[in-house]
Image: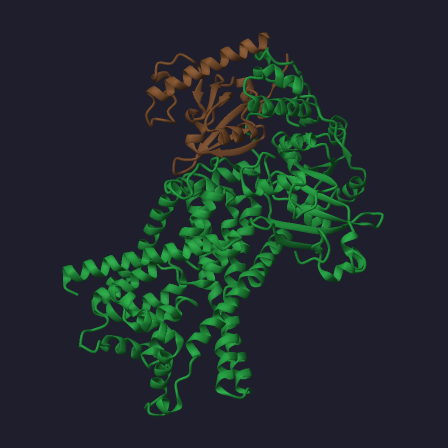
Amino acid sequence: METVAVEVSRRETVVEASRAKEGGEGNTDGHATEVDRTGCTSPLRPLSGLPPGTVAIVESVHGARDLRRRLLEMGFCNRTMVTAIRRAPLGDPIEFFLRGYYVSLRTEEARCVLVSPIPPVSEEERSNPSGLRLRK
Amino acid sequence: MAGCCDGCTILKRDHAKGCGPVPDSREVRRFTVALAGNPNSGKTTLFNGLTGLRQKVANYPGVTVEKKIGLCRLPEGTWIDVIDLPGAYSLVPQSPDEQVAMEVLRGTRSDTRAPDAIIAVVDASNLQRNLYLVSQIIEMGRPLVVVLNMVDVAERRGVRVDAGALERRLGVPVVPVVGHRRYGIPELLRAIGQARVAPVPDWSIRMRVAGIDPMQADIEAHYGWIEEVAAVCQSTALAPGVVESPVRQADEARVHQPTVLPIFRPPTHLSERIDSFLIHRVWGLIAFAFIMGSMFAAMFWLAKPIQSTLSGFIGMIGSVVASHLPGDALQSLVRDGIFAGVGSVIVFVPQIAILFLFLAVLEDSGYLSRAAFLMDRLLSRVGLHGKSFIPLLSGFACAIPAIMATRTIERRRSRLATILVLPFMTCSARLPVYGLLVGTFFAAYGSLIQAGVMLGLYVLGIVFAAAVALVFRRTLLRGQDSGFILELPTYKVPQPSVVGRQVWSNSRQFLTRAGTTIFLICLALWTISYYPRLPQDQAGRLPDEGARAAAQRSYSFAGRLGRTIEPGIRPLGFDWKIGVACIGAFAAREVFVSTLAIVHGTGTDDREENLAASMQADRYPDGRKVWTPLVTASVLLWFVLAMQCLSTVMVVRQETGGWRWPVFMLVYMNALAYVACLSLYQIGSRVWGG
């Protein structure tokens, strides 16, 4: 039962965040400061706003049913880690890395995935190219 | 299906060893396995490795998904059927490919028997996402063998997958394979005999816990199981020992699994280094332009000499054969009907082969999805897909191979929209028509203006294609098509066997399916332009051969049809000669020029200047010029917009699996062309006074 409660509260935050996004966001997607500018204090931001090279954790997926299903099925679930790689030369779509493979999403689709960014990696981690941290 | 027994599509010569004697072979029921897996999991290479040359490619009825069935011999000597299913990410289908894969696996397709066992092909270098489909297949409770493909690629990427551990975890045979080296194939053949039903993991408990949204809970439960499986059998060579993620530590709501985690930072292997060049914002576009340029150049210039040699050769045989036949009608039937018909089918094959050679190499190497990635922005604005680019580009050479190339677009609506606008691309068959008209009526303006007009016609085609695509995607083909979501697979060296089979099977499919109908249309067009014959006494009064040919053509059904429709095309500025030439152009657009030459009585010499002079001098009985600048513009616009090439219509039928879309295409394009030419001529003649 406790787990359910945790889930519910997490989802509510998400809904708030997405409402704030809808209200305050123009076509400024792709800028790192987007979520902050809307005045939302939640650390969640759309995947489309993740600067290339940064890592984030998938928190929730929204959007039309089929799109949402396919995003989940492609592995955007269970708090998985996603790295933004690059935007296509014409600005769209965006390439991501998750679960050991590369996938590209259009900006409007990446907007459906809400993530919480991971703080920048330390020197020790950067020296470890696999990106995995040894347990102490 | 061409086979003679239920579910059997094997060539007849294999029946002796395969199905036994042919009579009542319905009772013969071979063990059938289906190869299922994600796109890019190396399924096709494995299929080729298992079946060799004993395979047959057809289409699933009603859809344009390839049905590939092959024969494979097990070590003990029995033959089994192997079905290569189209690639699928999930059994909840979102594309025609996935729909077919799901239906065959579940045994709900009436045209394909449910497989006795399933071989699930898993890309070892991309274990987690590949295991998602496997987790769905496990739920079906069918005998299963898991193939761990591309273990070499995985090793190179620093990922080692323990097949033994995976086998113990899944409860079914797991065979590591390197498809293109045939490593592991004998073991796989042995394992097929031992296929077992995998125990279904109990994810219902987890689903209840997380159960707010059943769909999400279901997928997350599957992935939860996958993460556990991956943790047990996958190790990363770069970080030996027990590793765990900072995220996992924080995530207390979850069962703690102190094992290997999904790699979350992209590795820097060869594939990534290639990508940093090939999809770089500057170099990537230059490389793209170069690759597309060479593909187009090959289709346009390399195919040309082959085509002219082929059609010249066929024409020559036709003349030789005809010269030994009695009677004018029989000679003409053989020379201008049968051999010309065969020639007009064969002429497409070089371009089809060249385009599919490029396409197969690009697809098998992994570049095709990068090309889509680069171009998607451009095409998504008009509702098309990044993968529409190569077909549209090929359309500038010829719409027929281009429409076949739309098979690479998985999404149904995007694919249909691409097919429907493709004929607006200025194909090479329009060039002789443009060349004649622009060369004749813009001769006074110098070559720069002429080049500008030609360029304008190309641009006009592109503009119409974009506008029409946008309209269709907003109306008839509305809907998101569940998004772009495009995997960028690891680069690999294209397999000659995969490439060769692509080229061969596509050329063959064109010849056997669209080719036969194109041939029949050519015969029909020959008949209406040959019959009825001009009476001898009338022909005898004409001065020369050219005049006789012209009189004959206007006397024939085609000529009468041209006169009959004249009231209908007069508002466009066309006279009956243009009408007859347009009817001739239904065989192929460039036939417009030769038909016009025949009705102008200059058909017997090959000099285009004579035709040009005759056209410039052509007048109505009341003394008005036939070819005013406005009429020329109207005819050019007609050729930009109208759907004249019946061969294209036949290929659309082949590719969409029915008459609905080809008929729609014929009607909408010609209606659009008619309205456009009507507006141009009527408004133009009011403004400039004819």
Q: Which chain is green?
A: B
Q: Classify the position of the C terminus of chain B by image quarter.
A: bottom left
Q: Position of residue A87 (x, y in %)?
A: 43, 33
Residue B369 placed where, x, y %? 51, 42
Count the marks: how many?
0
Is B92 rendered above or below residue B333?
A: above
Q: Is residue B356 visible?
A: yes
Viewer-side residue, A32 vs B618: B618
In this view, B195 is above or below A44: below
Q: Colour of chain A?
A: brown
Left or right of residue B89: residue B570: left
One can see residue B308 in this view: no
Closer to the camera in the image, B151 or B419: B419
Furthest residue in direction right, as rendered: B76
* Image spot of residue B48 (x, y percent): 68, 50
Q: Name the quarter where the N terminus of chain B is drawn.
A: bottom right
